[in-house]
Image (tube, rainbow, N blue to C red):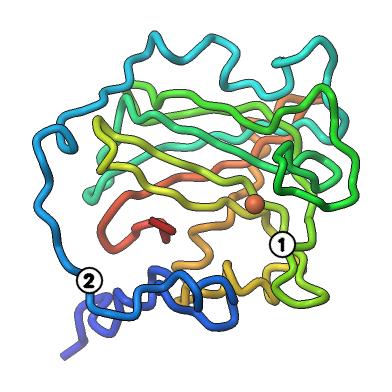
Amino acid sequence: MDQPTGYNRDPAAEQPPYLYPDYRSTVLRAPKRPLVPLPHTLSEITGPVYGHEKVGPLDHDLTRQHDGEPLGERIIVHGQVMDTHGRPLPDALMEIWQANSAGRYRHDADNHPAPLDPNFSGGGRCTSDADGRYRFVTIKPAAYPWGNDPNAWRPAHIHFSLFGTAFVTRLITQMYFPGDPLLDCDPIFNSTADAAARQRLVCRLDLEKTEPEWALAYEFDIVLRGRDATPMEG
Ligand SMILES: [Fe+2]
């Protein structure tokens, strides 16, 4: 008799572990003792709640936050947020942050000698609509060195944070671009052991949503839980 689909799947291999020695900073931060579950308090479960009114009309467009346009390749990043059963998740607050087209973050801790762009802050947010869909306009980020070893450069990526209705429902992940040669040697990407799960972190070139002569589109769906869950960092 055939085994049911997914019989041999290892759920632990589909999410990155706390400790992954090739990703050196996990050695310092991974818990060394068993986790102690703490009961949630009422305030953790119920608030704060983010409403639509807190997200500005241009917050989803990282190319229109300053007087001029940022340098680099303009792209559209869109997709759908879904729950365990593939149902769309509306009203999720989504935040992204990323390096600019030269691989530099606008952050005091970023010492990479690549230029900052006065027209690019690298942060955006939106809420998913009634069908769980979201859309950002931004600039394709570049790779940057990160000191894990002398030749360690992060593949181009966009950080995603999703909030439900409370702090305890925050999830964080990273989106990568298809065909990036740095993916094979990136310990953060490869800390998710399961190859199929890793591919859920790679967006898809979407020519249907591309706006001709203006911006290529990439599709990145996010599944919060279940067998098709997107690997999450926290
Ligand atoms: Fe990053």
Count residues near mark 2 (Cα–Cα under 10 Å), then give few for <14, some for 14-19, many for 20+: few
Q: x%, y% of residue 150?
A: 82, 76
Residue 11 vertical position relative to residue 234 in the rendered view, above or below: below
Kindly identify the amino acid type of the residue bearing the numbered disc 2. Leu
The mark total stands at 2
Nearer the observer: mark 2 or 1; the answer is 2
Residue at the (52%, 26%) spot, across then down: 125
Q: Is residue 143 above or below residue 40?
A: below
Q: Position of residue 96 (x, y in %)?
A: 55, 36
**Residue 166 against residue 24 in the figure, above or below:** above
Q: Does the residue labelled 1 lie within 8 Å of ligand 1?
A: yes
For the N terminus, give its image quadrant. Answer: bottom left
**Residue furthest toward the bottom?**
1
Toward the viewer: 216 or 53? 53
Residue name at image x 79 percent, y 45 percent: 104
* Disc 1 target residue: 154
Left or right of 145: which side holds 4? left
Q: What residue type is labelled 1?
A: Arg
Disc assigned to residue 233: none
- Helix, strand or loop status at disc 1: strand
Residue 35 numbered tag: 2
Where is the C terminus found, in terms of image quarters? Answer: bottom left
Q: How crowded is mark 1: few (under 14 residues within 10 Å), some or many (20 or more)?
A: many
Residue 157: horizontal and vertical position, in percent? 66, 51
CA–CA distance in space, label 2 to label 1: 30 Å
| In-image side of 83 versus 132 (left or right) | left
